[in-house]
Image (cartoon, coloured by chain):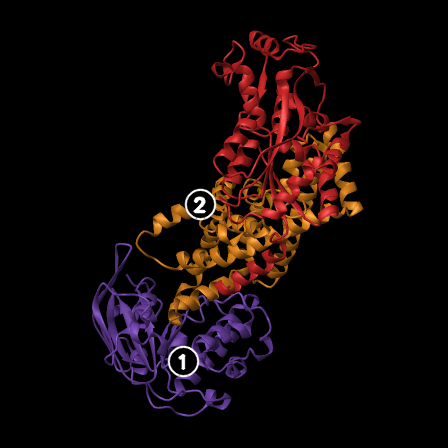
Chain colours: A orange, B red, C purple
Amino acid sequence: MQDMGEALAVAMTLVLSGDGDLVEIVGLSLRVSLTATVAACAIGLPIGALVATNRFPGRGAVLVVMNALMGLPPVVVGLIVYLHLSRAGPLGFLGLLYTPAAMIIAQTILIAPIVAALSRQVIEDMHAEYADHFSSLCLTTRQTVQALLWDARYALLTVALAGFGRAVAEVGAVMIVGGNIDHLTRVMTTAIALETSKGDLPLALGLGIVLMILALGVNALVHSLRLTAVRQAYA
Amino acid sequence: MKPLRLAALLCAVSLPCAALADDILVQSTTSTANSGLYDHLLPIFAEATGIQVNVVAVGTGQAIRNARNCDGDVLLVHAKPAEEKFVADGFGASRTDLMYNDFIIVGPAADPAAVAGLDDIQPALEKIAAAQALFASRGDDSGTHKKEVSLWASTSVDPATASGDWYRETGSGMGATLNAGIGMGAYVMTDRATWISFKNKQDYKILVEGDADLFNQYGVIPVSAKKCPSVNVEGAQAFADWLLSDAGQAAIADYEVDGQQLFFPNAPD
Amino acid sequence: MREAIIHGPEALTEGAVPASNLLPLRVRGLCLSLGGRRILNNLDLELGPTGCTVLLGPNGAGKTQFLKLLHGLLEPDTGEIDWNGAKPAQITSRQALVFQKPVLLRRSVAANVDFVLKSRNLPRARRNALLDHVGLGDKARQPARLLSGGEAQRLALARALATEPEVLFLDEPTASLDPASVNRIEEIVLQAVRNGTRVILVTHDIGQARRLADEIVFLHGGRVAEQAAADRFFAGPRTPAARAHVSGGLVL
């Protein structure tokens, strides 16, 4: 366990020294994964809300598929996105491979099903509570979905957080579509993989600790937001 | 959020970091990247030409496949037959010898197959097989893996029959294979550059080296604009030309880790 | 559709309005089963154009389901509900229903009313008048879900009145409220009746029925056991079941 102690020391040094490369990598990690989370919410929340509030034939199958897609392997997502964005692929002309945009796309695909499936559950529970009031008001589907998304916002924040956690921690997809290019597409997880493959385990672990501190910070922020909401009975 | 706003957001996030037209992308083997060679070379090249070089470091097999998809401007790998096929298929403009180092066998200090000090690779591999001592192979179609397979083929042993037994194919990069091999006490064949710069050596030592068969040649290939119209032809040629020039070759020779030279330039005059 | 009932704060409290053209209501042969249990059994009913009708009946008589059927939130198994030529689902938006346990949005008091106004494209300026009308003017900024039971029910009433309903259904609106709260809510309901809103109210509170009802409909065994003007009914119910119910006896 000597490495653990060394890793802690490395992590402390990295954080306290404000190492320029580290700041850049952390910044890119946050930018890519937060953008992917926002995009995944823009896609996943309406889908989750629509499935939650509507009864239609084949709904059971849709639920099973949504839940299954939560387990998408990052490497597979990375490969599929790579094949599309590659110069030889159908979207190669966009020139997006090996850019942060490619990483955002891959992570969005990875976590949109998580956002959709988890939000479906949250919204369905709330809809059961609101349904009578809403049908009495003769709301349209659009009004219903908008109202539910707004009223469930604090619970959905936790859903978004689950997506963000998965995005910021995955390495398989961003490694393939980002290429782990120094100063361009290197993020926390690919940097950790790189240092591991160089055999620099303390530095890899140190970076891992920084990543966990980051996740801790984001979670604490969301938690305090929720606490405020709970106090006002908005959550 | 409206789809339009989403698209705008994606653009705003991605555009500032999309590769600029002047940049070039190198599809590279891992040893040159992980050993820090590019960190040494690229600033010198950028200083001389103003061209920014981005490196994707993957196994040689993967690098060639990516380049065949036109996802790179320059290929820098170490598997001569595969490189020549790449050029013959029209994907590479030309292949030139760039530099070399050598492969070595590293193993635990205990050396269960007693191969320490051998300078002949075939007997060493046969002793490992006879002792059924663990051997960790890349198993990933990389340049190093191709080399290792060809070396086994020159022995009387077919390690594939012992796959999963004493012959362990990790299916990962050099660093990951070294970590795994060291973790299980297996012998590992690695290029010298990766080994010297590798930081998790524990009690491992170089046990077999010096056989002419362990020679490791690196080549550089600008990707052909005929197959891949999107490549940055001038940038790619400028990078290859510089690597092969006296200045580039001297820069390669200058690179040392722990006082040891990692790569030996051997571009043709 | 008739003229809007409410034009400003003053309109909330005074002024007679012509009766809704949704009335008379005719219900024929209504049957409803839920979970294998027959709740309404060939129910017939006619309701006139004005006033407050109170539905009485023992627990499980199907009063809540009957309100939902009239409001178009439930479909009957068989039978017909005729709102002067319209089916319930066609005119749901011209009615409002206040539930026994109000469903309040996770928003402020004001935002709960705003939501209803916005859903109907009604001017948001009317919100303060509505809140003042139910005595919640000073609580507009508070989280709705932190209101007391009585306040919550008054907010539900404000929301219901916001849509200017021609028919207002109330499902035990004062169950488990303290007497002061009951008083305030009955005041608001009486005012709505005076303003010409057709009120149909379910209650177990016989005193409340006496105070509010112009007409009593007694449900028993899945159908209307007795229908009479309130003073007539309370002077002496004709059916034994109604008599027992009013006097607190057991109805089987």
Place residue A202 in its image quadrant: top right
The residue shown at (61%, 44%) is B236
| Residue at numbered disc 2 | A69
Q: Position of residue A7 (x, y in %)?
A: 73, 35
Chain containing mark 1:
C
In the image, is residue B17 above or below residue C199? above
Which element carries disc 2, helix, strand or loop? helix
Q: Position of residue C148 (x, y in %)?
A: 55, 68
Quadrant in which the C terminus of chain B is drawn: top right
The three-letter code of the residue at mark 1 reads: Arg
- On residue C10, the disc is none
Left or right of residue A166, residue A12 in this image: right
Say which of A181 and C248 sits in front.
A181
The three-letter code of the residue at mark 2 reads: Leu
Disc 2 versus disc 1: nearer the observer: 2
| Residue at numbered disc 1 | C211
In the image, is residue A54 above or below residue B262? below
Q: Position of residue C35 (x, y in %)?
A: 29, 55
Say which of B77 and A18 sits in front.
B77
Q: CA distance from mark 2 to mark 1?
A: 59 Å
